Image (spheres, rainbow, N blue to C red):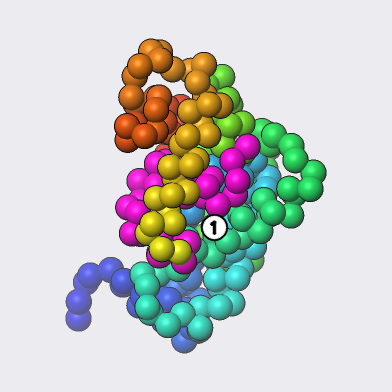
Amino acid sequence: MSDRPASDEELLRAHVAGEPEAFAELLRRHRDRLWSVALRTLGDREEAADALQDALLSAHRAAGRFRGDSAVTTWLHRIVVNACLDRVRRRQSHPTVPLPDGTRHFDQDSAGGAGPEPAAPPVDHDTALVVRQALAQLPAEQRAALVLVDLQGYSVAEVAEILGVAEGTVKSRCARGRARLAVLLGHLRPDPGDAAYGNPSTGGNVTSQSARATQEGGR
C-alpha cells in the first residue's frame, strides 16, 4: 500500500464518491492561494470572503462535472476568479474604492469544514493601500490578469487556462493594466527613468511595486 499523499484529482474523485473529508483536505492544500487571489482581485476582505465562499460551494456541488481536462487547482482558481469578477461587475454601477476592514472571518464550514480564513496582511501600510486603490480602478478583466500573473506568479499559459482565454489576450490585458497602473502609481516611482516602474513598453513590470507592497500576506 502506497504512503504517498492522494493527488488533487484523487481527492476530488473521493469527494464525488462520498468521502466526507476529501474536499476539506483539497481546500487545506489550496485555500491560502485561493484566498489571496480573491482578496487581491476584490480589494475588500468581506467581499473576498463572500466570493470565496460562493466559489467553494459551487466547486463542492459541481465536482461531479469535473472532466479532468485541466488541473484541479486550475479548475478551482477559475471558479474563484469568476465569482470575483461577477461581484466586480455587479458593483460597477456604484463604483467605490474598497478598503480591507480586517473584521470579517471566512467561514468554510458549509463548504467542507476547511477552517478559518487564511492569513492576510495584518496591517496595510500606505503604499499597499494606494496600490489596492489603483488596482480597484482597473477593468475587472485586466485586474484579474495582473493579480494572477504579477502578484501570484502564474505563467501566462496558466492564466490563459484559468481565465478561459487565449494567451495573447492575457498578455494584452496585462500590458494595458500595467500601462494604466504606470499612470496611477507614477508618484511612487523612485526614478522616472526606472524601467521597473515606468514605461510598460520596455517590459518593466509596474506591479512589482504592488507585489512588494502586499507580499506580507502570503499566497
The disc labelled 1 sits on which kind of residue?
Val
Q: Closest to the observer: 12 or 98?
A: 98
Looking at the image, which residue is at 61% across and 55% down? Answer: 85
Q: Is residue 59 magenta?
A: no
Relative to the observer, which residue lies in front, 58 or 209?
A: 209
- Please indicate, yes or no, whether residue 208 appears anywhere in the rendered image: no
Indicate the quadrant containing the C terminus: top left, top right, bottom left or bottom right: top left
**Depicted 10 relative to depicted 217: above or below:** below
- Image check: 189 left or right of 81? left
Query: Is any atom of residue 166 visible in this view?
Result: yes
At 32% from the left and 52% from the top, the residue drawn is: 155
The magenta stretch is 137-164
| Horizontal side of residue 205 vs 46, given as left or right | left
Q: What residue sits 35% from the left and 46% below the top? A: 153
For the stretch drawn in magenta, the main secondary structure is helix
Q: Quadrant of residue 26?
A: bottom left
